[in-house]
């Protein structure tokens, strides 16, 4: 009998060791490299050299509505993933010491990361997550539409220039095509809309003080007046208040939007799909410029968004294994491949980034001249605050609220999130 219990104990111990080497990853997706290699596949292969018995299980992020609902549900169920890899518009919520594992001493090459990129992930000296390569948007210009309306977009254009173009689009197409894209049925894709704040020189915060939103104090009423002008004049889709970003994408794919925010890295996937579905027969001719600027504004920063990764602090050996996987996920080789195959710009000093893509060079030029927006994506309150604006926009586009009251409501509700 004693021998039997010893055997059982050995089996249980073996099972325990085995179980401790399984880590769960909640992730937004993978990136294909060459010859069947992928971003996650390469990282796991390197991890297996150090921890040959480790098992990595994946759970996919549900991006419906752009919320953190998948992560929130897993945490509420007591099954928080060891690693959370997602857009920075969602991971910032978990950059808190109660949840996140400090990586300062666990990621051996953390000093290779761009200090500016890693700063938002650093809280009181602890690096609570790592940024991953991302991309930036510019204003996509459909040159085929511009040719048909007889308009040339200036590289450094103004709101006045934009409105002139918008009226030409309206007169030419009479509601079949629109000057720009707009949607307000959910928060998803709101970065495509929010870049207009920069056009009017309106910040969301100042000097990184995320405790105090300032959009109403700094002239945000001009942005909301502009939105109502777009609706009133028929420069945006008449039902923009009730459509989501997916509906906007369909309009864009069909070639029905003259000028709008877009990411160069998105174009191939969306337009190839549109061609396959018979929506269009070929790519449009296009270019990228910065968003137009209002009077008195000299620079219009653009919106940059990448992914972030956060490790759940468990106090077990799984923390060390997870940190090693994250180290491989963002190493120089991986970031170089992400640049090559996904057009995501590296954020570490030893990663190779070389692109011949003319559109990426246009975006690089926009950033070099104008900089990037600070909308507080790394602040843990960002996901909750992000949900505030779209119901206000719906009222604004329906003319149920004035721009003055709308922007005051927006800032007030943002400030109430502590």
Image (cartoon, grey):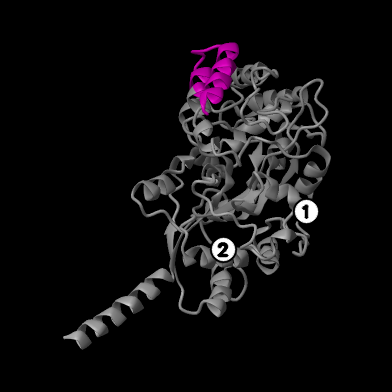
In the picture shown, does residue 384 fall above or below 415?
below
Q: Is residue 281 left or right of residue 7?
A: right
* Residue 254 at least partly seen: no
SS state under label 1: helix
* Residue 400 colored in magenta in the image: yes
Report if the CB atoms under discs 2 and 1 are less than 8 Å apart. Answer: no
SS state under label 2: helix
Residue 237: name its quadrant: top right
| Residue at point 83%, 40% (across, down) | 369
In the picture shown, does residue 337 fall above or below 159?
below
- Classify mark 2: residues with Cα within 10 Å, few (<14), some (14-19) or many (20+): many
Q: Position of residue 349 (x, y in %)?
A: 77, 60
Q: Position of residue 277 (x, y in %)?
A: 49, 53
Q: In the rendered image, which residue does mark 1 sit on?
A: 358
Task: Residue at the far front: name it.
Answer: 2
In the picture shown, does residue 236 fall above or below 317?
above
**Magenta segment range?**
392-418
């Amino acid at each position: 009998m004693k021998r039997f219990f010893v055997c059982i104990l050995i089996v249980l111990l073996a099972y325990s060791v085995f179980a401790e080497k399984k880590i769960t990853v909640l992730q937004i997706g993978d990136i294909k490299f060459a010859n069947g290699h992928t971003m996650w596949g390469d990282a796991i292969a390197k991890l297996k050299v150090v921890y040959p018995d480790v098992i990595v299980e994946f759970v996919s992020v549900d991006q419906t509505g752009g919320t953190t609902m998948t992560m929130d549900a897993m945490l509420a169920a007591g099954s928080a993933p060891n690693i959370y890899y997602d857009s920075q518009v969602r991971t910032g919520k978990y950059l808190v010491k109660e949840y996140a594992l400090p990586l300062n001493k666990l990621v051996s090459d953390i000093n290779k990361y761009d200090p500016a990129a890693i700063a938002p992930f650093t809280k009181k000296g602890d690096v609570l997550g790592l940024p991953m390569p991302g991309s930036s948007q510019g204003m996509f210009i459909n040159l085929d539409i511009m040719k048909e309306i007889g308009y040339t977009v200036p590289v450094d254009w103004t709101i006045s220039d934009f409105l002139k173009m918008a009226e030409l689009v309206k007169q030419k197409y009479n509601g079949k095509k629109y000057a720009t894209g707009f949607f307000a049925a959910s928060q998803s894709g709101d970065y495509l809309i929010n870049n207009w704040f920069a056009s009017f020189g309106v910040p969301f915060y100042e000097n990184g003080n995320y405790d105090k939103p300032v959009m109403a104090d700094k002239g945000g009423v001009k942005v909301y007046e502009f939105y109502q002008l777009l609706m009133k004049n028929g420069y945006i889709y008449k039902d923009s208040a009730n459509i989501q970003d997916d509906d906007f994408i369909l309009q864009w794919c069909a070639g029905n939007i003259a000028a709008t925010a877009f990411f160069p890295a998105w174009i191939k996937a969306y337009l190839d799909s549109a061609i396959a579905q018979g929506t269009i027969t070929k790519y449009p001719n296009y270019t990228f410029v910065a968003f137009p600027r209002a009077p008195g504004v000299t620079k219009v920063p653009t919106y940059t968004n990448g992914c972030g990764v956060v490790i759940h602090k468990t106090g077990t050996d799984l923390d060390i294994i997870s940190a090693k996987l994250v180290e491989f996920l963002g190493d120089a080789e991986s970031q170089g491949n992400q640049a090559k195959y996904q057009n995501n710009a590296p954020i570490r000093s030893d990663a190779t980034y070389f692109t011949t893509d003319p559109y990426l060079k246009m975006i690089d030029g926009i950033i070099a001249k104008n900089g990037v927006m600070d909308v507080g994506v790394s602040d843990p309150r960002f996901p909750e605050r992000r949900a505030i604006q779209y119901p206000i926009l719906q009222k604004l586009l329906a003319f149920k609220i004035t721009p003055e009251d709308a922007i005051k409501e927006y800032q007030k509700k943002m400030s109430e999130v502590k």
